[in-house]
Amino acid sequence: MKMKKIIALAAIASLILCGCEKPLSKKDLTYTDTLFDTVISVQILDPVDESVIKGCERLCKDYDAKFSKSNEESDISRINSAKGKFVEVSEDTVTLLEKGIYYSELSYGIFDITIGSVSDLWDFHAEQPSVPSKKKVRSAKKHVSYHNIMIQDNRVKLTDPKTKLDVGAIAKGYIADRLKEYLVKNEVKHAIINLGGNVLALGTKTDGSKYNIGIQRPFDESGQPITSIKVADKSVVTTGTYQRYFKKDGKLYHHVLNPATGYPCENTLSSVTIITDSSLTADALSTTCFLLGFEEGLKLVNLLDNVDAVFITDDNEIHYSENFMK
């Protein structure tokens, strides 16, 4: 399946439109784009000036320019290419990296934002994707360690010149939280932010009812949800094997890479969805729990306050965290 089709289906599956009870009014404002390696949209349900949605567009493009690994001028790319020297970056980039280090420490390194040297070997967008050689993977994974990130004020360097940042597992969450802050500042009370598999519901729908968020049935080309959850003022973030993958010689290779092996992690999970207040927290935890596997991921969620989870195992069984949505 083509990459763009997978992205579009993932976005469709998580949209709240599947749960709308009435047509959208003419006052609704929507911004749609292709950024952060996915299809995104911001939908404001309140009657506000059009300049507010234009502001969302500016923010999204600004963050994409800062965090993109493919843009040579981005903060992340400049750090990666600095060969171990300090690079002056934005406050947003420093905050994002500090958050990444925090979750790397929380997970004892199973979540690691210096996975870039490994992820560079896996091109899930190629017309004919290939499995990198064992030699290249062994070499690349030696440079994966969040301990190699050094931050001094607004300057960042990688102490191992061959270490590379890849903030794909937290950037969308960070951006969604910043978009929410911007909308609240502009007196928006009802909106939905959808950055691919990252959905942030601001408030409720205008009639006071909750948003209905679909969780995609893994590998279903129609984009139909396997289940849905009703939320208000929460973030819902999914990490799944079906989001970016290819098959080679009958084996499936997906984008959730294990820093310890350099290869896609292998366990019984097809997807993990995290529901909590912060989109960045949900983003980091969805990847962390996926890498930990079903049993250990479930244990972690059950230890955390104000965090709910939905695990879909490879037999399409649905599993909920201990105190789900209580």
Image (cartoon, rainbow, N blue to C red):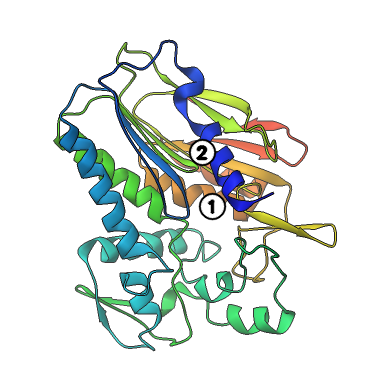
Res. 11 mark = 2
Q: Residue at 41% x, 43% y: name it.
A: 40
Mark 2 residue element: helix
Earlier residue among tags 2 and 1: 2
Q: Which amino acid does label 1 sit on?
A: Thr
Above or below residue 113? Residue 295 is above
Mark 1 residue element: helix
Q: Residue at 58% x, 38% y: name it.
A: 9
The spot of residue 289 in percent (x, y) is 57, 49
Q: Nearer the viewer, residue 300 or 137?
A: 137
Q: Residue at 39% x, 89% y: name it.
A: 83
Q: In this view, does 44 lie to the left or right of 268?
A: left
Query: Alpha-carbon distance for marks 2 and 1?
Result: 18 Å
Q: In the rendered image, which quarter is residue 132 located in?
A: bottom right
Res. 287 mark = 1
Q: Residue at 60% x, 48% y: name it.
A: 243
Above or below residue 231? Residue 160 is below
